[in-house]
Image (tube, rainbow, N blue to C red):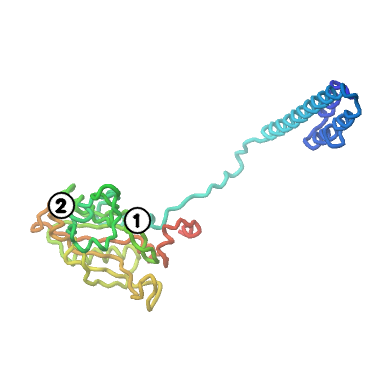
Amino acid sequence: MLDHDETLGQAREELEGCLDVEATRAVERRYLGKQGVVQGQLAEIPRLEPDARRAAGQAANRLKQDLQQAVQERIEALESADIAAQRAGTGFDATLPAPHSQRGGLHPITQVTRELEDLFRSMGYDVLDGPEVELDYYNFEALNIPGDHPARDSHDTFFCQGDGHLLMRTHTSPVQVRAMERFEPPMRIVVPGKCFRQETTDASHDHTFHQMEGLVIDRNVSVSHLIGAMKTLLRGIFGRDLDVRLRPGFFPFVEPGFELDARCPFCTDGCSVCKKTTWIELLPCGLVHPNVLRSGGLDPDEWGGFAFGLGLSRLVMLKHGIDDVRHLLGGDLRFLEQF
């Protein structure tokens, strides 16, 4: 039988001479492999006297464990030395170029929103914000849409559970009354923000969309002021005059109301975006209804104004030639990186 200390000492000497893990594994196979030293000792145990077999087996197992530990210690020492050498050889070279870091970009809706904010500020407007979780009063009642008004049906509202007075705003128009309550007229404001409606998703509709509300309150405001402001707005957005039309439209919070449509840039005889009409609804607008002025605490005999609601998602589609609104909020970087 092998002497434990002598065999272990010999193995340690061989391991100390190993300069890499591969050489260490070779020593391991020589002592612990299927044809190794320890396996040979185990093969001799059945030939021993019964009384000596147990002691021989215990000795062989102890030698095997000690050899395994010695091999593992050598491997760990070699790996630590490699790491230390790598660290010692790693210096900072100030002449090397900095590592490239990919820069993010603004979402196309954010880009257009900021462009519009700058445009309106140049026209003397203030940019305001309002809550996305809105009171039923500001979203409907204060805008001349009482509880039994049929116009509520078209809004497909998300109501908050447990409270019939809270809802996800269906448009940015609630800020009209909030602004009239907060500020003294005359005023010019725009309100960009997200809106929410339970709508069937298609190429031109989504349950979450972006709007920009505009409101002007002053004395002696007329439709001609509204038309002039809208022409200036569209010229500033597109840098050119668009093929547009102004037609009558109904909105409870304006009187009279109009629809400003733009010619569909994706077709000549109708498509899914324009619903086969060759026109895209872009800008509902009109003169502020007297009841809305009263809700804001203003006297309609003294003050008047006009309001408009710009669909930012559709505007982005027009500006960049996008044929499906779902691309904007889909989160596909292959699409968004183009902007």
Discs 2/1, front: 2
Q: Is residue 319 or residue 236 the one in the foreground? A: 319
> In the drawing, does residue 127 fall left or right of residue 10?
left
Q: Residues within 10 Å of mark 2 (few under 14, many from 20)?
A: some
Question: Dividing the image into 4 quarters, which one contains the N terminus?
Answer: top right
Residue 59, given in percent of the width and then of the height, sits at 82, 23
- Horizontal placement of 238 versus 332: left or right? left
Q: Quadrant of residue 283?
A: bottom left
Give the camera-side residue of 89 and 157.
157
Name above or below for residue 182 compared with residue 331: above
CA distance for labels 2 and 1: 26 Å
Q: What's the amino acid at mark 1? A: Thr
Q: Where does the image place residue 94, in percent across and percent down from the top left? A: 60, 39
178 or 95: which is nearer to us?
A: 178
Where disc 1 sits, the SS reads helix
Q: Which mark is residue 299?
A: none
Q: Position of residue 84 (x, y in %)?
A: 69, 31
Q: Residues within 10 Å of mark 1 (few under 14, many from 20)?
A: many
Query: In the image, which disc is placed on residue 113?
Result: 1
Q: Quadrant of residue 279?
A: bottom left
How far across and how far down the image is residue 194, in percent?
Answer: 33, 54
- Marker count (numbered): 2
Kindly identify which residue carries mark 2: 296
Identify the residue at image location x=66%, y=36%.
90
296 sits to left or right of 127? left
Inspect the image, locate mark 2, and give the three-letter code of the amino acid beneath it.
Gly
